Image (cartoon, helix red, strand yellow):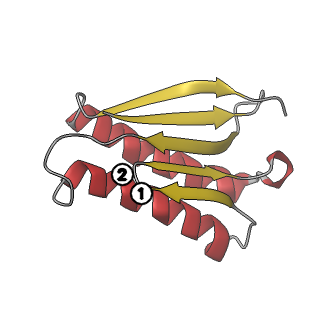
Amino acid sequence: MIRILVFRRSDEQIVGIEVKGHSGFAKKGADPVCAAVSVLAENLAASLEILLELPVKTDFQKGFCKIFLESELINKSSELLFSSVLLGFKTLSLQFPQQVHIEDSCNISS
Protein backbone atom coordinates (compact mmCIF):
# COMPACT_ATOMS: atom_id res chain seq x y z
CA MET A 1 0.00 0.00 0.00
CA ILE A 2 1.08 3.55 -0.72
CA ARG A 3 0.76 5.88 2.29
CA ILE A 4 0.57 9.59 1.64
CA LEU A 5 1.08 11.90 4.61
CA VAL A 6 0.00 15.54 4.29
CA PHE A 7 1.71 18.02 6.62
CA ARG A 8 -0.06 21.26 7.52
CA ARG A 9 0.64 24.30 9.64
CA SER A 10 -1.75 25.17 12.45
CA ASP A 11 -3.59 27.48 10.01
CA GLU A 12 -4.22 24.42 7.76
CA GLN A 13 -1.84 25.54 4.99
CA ILE A 14 -0.07 22.54 3.44
CA VAL A 15 3.72 22.68 3.82
CA GLY A 16 4.67 19.23 2.61
CA ILE A 17 3.88 15.67 1.70
CA GLU A 18 5.53 12.33 2.26
CA VAL A 19 4.81 9.32 0.07
CA LYS A 20 5.97 5.82 0.95
CA GLY A 21 5.38 2.27 -0.08
CA HIS A 22 4.33 0.41 -3.21
CA SER A 23 0.79 -0.24 -4.34
CA GLY A 24 1.18 -3.91 -5.18
CA PHE A 25 -1.45 -3.49 -7.88
CA ALA A 26 0.87 -4.91 -10.54
CA LYS A 27 4.45 -6.07 -10.73
CA LYS A 28 7.17 -3.47 -10.20
CA GLY A 29 7.95 -1.52 -13.32
CA ALA A 30 4.46 -2.09 -14.73
CA ASP A 31 2.29 -0.73 -11.91
CA PRO A 32 0.02 2.09 -13.12
CA VAL A 33 -0.93 3.13 -9.57
CA CYS A 34 2.70 3.59 -8.51
CA ALA A 35 3.39 5.41 -11.78
CA ALA A 36 0.47 7.80 -11.25
CA VAL A 37 1.51 8.64 -7.68
CA SER A 38 5.12 9.13 -8.77
CA VAL A 39 4.18 11.46 -11.62
CA LEU A 40 1.97 13.55 -9.35
CA ALA A 41 4.72 13.88 -6.73
CA GLU A 42 7.48 14.65 -9.24
CA ASN A 43 5.29 17.22 -10.98
CA LEU A 44 4.54 18.94 -7.67
CA ALA A 45 8.24 19.25 -6.84
CA ALA A 46 9.07 20.54 -10.33
CA SER A 47 6.16 23.00 -10.36
CA LEU A 48 7.09 24.48 -6.98
CA GLU A 49 10.72 24.82 -8.02
CA ILE A 50 10.43 25.86 -11.67
CA LEU A 51 7.10 27.66 -11.96
CA LEU A 52 7.11 29.35 -8.54
CA GLU A 53 10.90 29.50 -8.18
CA LEU A 54 10.73 28.31 -4.57
CA PRO A 55 13.52 26.40 -2.84
CA VAL A 56 11.95 22.98 -2.36
CA LYS A 57 13.31 20.38 0.04
CA THR A 58 12.97 17.01 -1.66
CA ASP A 59 14.06 13.46 -1.01
CA PHE A 60 13.25 10.98 -3.76
CA GLN A 61 14.16 7.31 -3.27
CA LYS A 62 12.70 4.01 -4.40
CA GLY A 63 9.32 3.69 -2.71
CA PHE A 64 9.67 6.99 -0.84
CA CYS A 65 9.58 10.72 -1.42
CA LYS A 66 9.32 13.88 0.66
CA ILE A 67 8.46 17.32 -0.69
CA PHE A 68 8.53 20.26 1.73
CA LEU A 69 8.62 24.03 1.71
CA GLU A 70 9.74 26.21 4.58
CA SER A 71 6.62 27.38 6.38
CA GLU A 72 7.28 31.07 5.71
CA LEU A 73 7.44 30.42 1.93
CA ILE A 74 3.86 29.15 1.71
CA ASN A 75 1.67 31.42 -0.42
CA LYS A 76 -1.56 31.17 -2.41
CA SER A 77 0.24 29.74 -5.44
CA SER A 78 2.08 27.03 -3.52
CA GLU A 79 -1.10 26.16 -1.64
CA LEU A 80 -2.91 25.78 -4.97
CA LEU A 81 -0.23 23.37 -6.23
CA PHE A 82 -0.32 21.32 -3.01
CA SER A 83 -4.14 21.24 -3.12
CA SER A 84 -4.06 20.16 -6.74
CA VAL A 85 -1.72 17.23 -6.08
CA LEU A 86 -3.82 16.26 -3.05
CA LEU A 87 -6.90 16.18 -5.30
CA GLY A 88 -5.02 13.83 -7.65
CA PHE A 89 -4.03 11.58 -4.74
CA LYS A 90 -7.62 11.56 -3.43
CA THR A 91 -8.92 10.60 -6.86
CA LEU A 92 -6.47 7.69 -6.96
CA SER A 93 -7.40 6.62 -3.42
CA LEU A 94 -11.07 6.49 -4.42
CA GLN A 95 -10.30 4.42 -7.51
CA PHE A 96 -7.75 2.19 -5.75
CA PRO A 97 -8.67 2.16 -2.03
CA GLN A 98 -6.63 -0.98 -1.33
CA GLN A 99 -3.53 0.58 -2.86
CA VAL A 100 -3.55 4.27 -1.83
CA HIS A 101 -4.17 5.66 1.66
CA ILE A 102 -4.01 9.37 2.61
CA GLU A 103 -3.40 10.71 6.12
CA ASP A 104 -4.24 14.39 6.08
CA SER A 105 -3.85 15.22 9.73
CA CYS A 106 -0.12 15.66 10.29
CA ASN A 107 0.19 19.11 11.86
CA ILE A 108 3.43 20.98 12.37
CA SER A 109 3.90 24.18 14.30
CA SER A 110 3.92 27.30 12.17
Q: Position of residue 76 (x, y in %)?
A: 71, 53
Cα–Cα gap, marks 1 and 2 = 5 Å
Can you say whether 41 is above or below 17 in the image? below
- Mark 1 neighbour density, 10 Å: few (under 14) some (14–19) many (20 or more): some
Give the residue displayed 64% in from the left and 35% down from the top. Answer: 7
Give the residue displayed 66% in from the left and 70% down from the top. Answer: 49
Residue 18 located left or right of residue 92: right
The residue indicated by pointer 2 is 37
Callout 1 touching callout 2 (CB < 8 Å): yes
Amino acid type indicated by mark 1: Leu
Give the residue displayed 56% in from the left and 70% down from the top. Answer: 46
Q: Position of residue 4 (x, y in %)?
A: 46, 37
Residue 50 located left or right of residue 33: right
Residue 14 located left or right of residue 39: right
Q: Quadrant of residue 30?
A: bottom left
Q: Position of residue 56 (x, y in %)?
A: 70, 62
- Mark 2 neighbour density, 10 Å: few (under 14) some (14–19) many (20 or more): many
Give the residue displayed 74% in from the left and 67% down from the top. Answer: 54
Of residue 51 and residue 102, the one placed in the foreground of this image is 102
Q: Secondary structure at mark 1?
A: helix
Assign the N terminus to one quadrant of the image. top left
Q: Secondary structure at mark 2?
A: helix
Residue 40: assigned label: 1
Amino acid type indicated by mark 2: Val
Of residue 8 and residue 42, the one placed in the foreground of this image is 42
